[in-house]
Image (spheres, grey):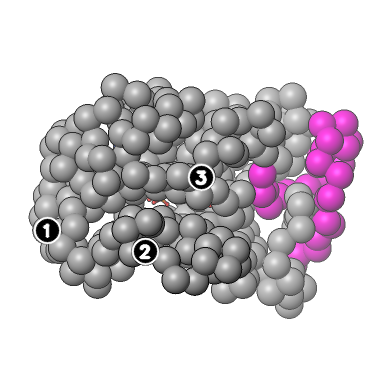
Amino acid sequence: MYKIAIIEEIHKDGIDLLERHPDFEYELISDVSEKNLINKLPKFDACTLRVSKLDEKILKSCSKLKAISRHGVGYDNVDLNYIKKKNITLLVTATANAVAVAEHVISMFLFLSKAMSNYDKEVRNGNFKLNSKKIKTFEMLNKDILIAGFGRIGKKLISRCLAFDTNVYVYDPYVDEKIIKKSGGIKINSIIDGLKIADYVSLHMPLTKETKNLINYSILKQMKKNAIIVNTARGGIINEIDLDKALNENLIFGAGLDVFEKEPINLDNPLLGNKKVILSPHSATFTDECTSRMGIETIKNIIDFFENKIDKSMIVKL
Ligand SMILES: NC(=O)c1ccc[n+]([C@@H]2O[C@H](COP(=O)([O-])OP(=O)(O)OC[C@H]3O[C@@H](n4cnc5c(N)ncnc54)[C@H](O)[C@@H]3O)[C@@H](O)[C@H]2O)c1
């Protein structure tokens, strides 16, 4: 019998799947304090993981742990050096969430370019007969889009962008031009060149030393005045102070952020008062369908791992 720790609640569909497998028993751990995790985790063979942190101090107590199954695809909350040393396998929900994130990007593109929050406010204030010049709006038709990072999400996003009759440029130094071309995109070798020509930008790369603060004031200054930039990847890729400044100086038109340098976002973050930015609380995958898929895939990965039939695309190469 394998003992599975469900660290933080997951969708019932995932739990149902686990309950149908007689070789597994589980316990839900809702108190994710360091003390409780150190106390509880030693008896488990595997665990699921949402946003709480598994650092070396906690992992040291997990002598039986063979696999960590992330509910999602990012894993900056796990001490990778330690699990590599201890041969603990890290699994991600590789197929569950890309579409939900891609739809989130499209909704932010449209919400910003059609100035939906301004229109909504005017109607509620009784200003139905608006002068069309009062609020500037754009169409996506024939616009140039830059997708930076062409992995699971970037690949789902491109077809959705192309459906709006746009030109899509892709920046991803690690993806072959042929793959981009086959998807209908145009490979671009310098992100700066892409940012300079794009009307819409969407970021889909990991946060690394290389991508931290990639979008800063000097870059924002070179972008088009009508540009809209959306970050659903990781906070810190866009410098938030620089973004706020650039929006206030009308250097770009708008921004959509689902991820932040610090989460939850600090209440004194200037972006909270900036009307040119639309914000969501790291919720791009919170659709009914996606939370169910992620719950199921998180559990399926654990079952497949112990039954030696895990799909390689679910394993993080350490
Ligand atoms: N907002 C959310 O809820 C949410 C949900 C899922 C994923 N994410 C984040 O979205 C991002 C993309 O996820 P994914 O599943 O598509 O990941 P992925 O690993 O499938 O793709 C990432 C791509 O980025 C590319 N890349 C790496 N470094 C790069 C660089 N310096 N410049 C350009 N491209 C680079 C890689 O070659 C890869 O193709 C990740 O940061 C992930 O954590 C956020």
Which residue type carries mark 2?
Answer: Asn
Q: Quadrant of the C terminus?
A: top left
Query: Label 2 vs label 1: CA separation?
Result: 42 Å
Quick one: 166 or 77, which is closer to the camera? 166
Q: Is residue 17 visible?
A: no
In this picture, is 139 found above or below 283? Answer: below
Q: Is mark 1 within 8 Å of ligand 1?
A: no
Mark 2 lies on residue: 131
Q: Is residue 283 left or right of residue 34?
A: left
In this picture, is 217 found above or below 233? Answer: above
Magenta-drawn segment: 23-51
Within 10 Å of disc 1 (Cα), the crowding (few <14, some 14-19, many 20+) is: few
Q: Secondary structure at mark 3?
A: loop
From the viewer's perspective, is the residue at label 3 or at label 1 nearer? 3
Within 10 Å of disc 2 (Cα), the crowding (few <14, some 14-19, many 20+) is: few
Q: Residue 298: name its quadrant.
A: bottom right
Residue name at image x 74 percent, y 71 percent:
12
Which of the two discs, 2 and 1, labels the residue nearer the N terminus? Answer: 2
Residue name at image x 22 percent, y 40 percent:
224
User: Which of the numbered marks, if any, corresponds to residue 181?
Assistant: 1
* Residue 34 forms part of the magenta stretch: yes
Which residue type carries mark 1?
Answer: Lys
Within 10 Å of disc 3 (Cα), the crowding (few <14, some 14-19, many 20+) is: some
Residue name at image x 76 percent, y 58 percent:
9
Q: Position of residue 56 (x, y in %)?
A: 68, 25
From the viewer's perspective, is the residue at label 3 or at label 2 nearer? 2
Query: Label 3 vs label 2: CA separation?
Result: 20 Å
Mark 3 lies on residue: 275
Query: Label 3 vs label 1: CA separation?
Result: 37 Å
Which of the two discs, 3 and 2, labels the residue nearer the N terminus? Answer: 2
User: Which of the numbered marks, if any, corresponds to residue 47?
Assistant: none
Q: Is residue 129 left or right of residue 122?
A: left
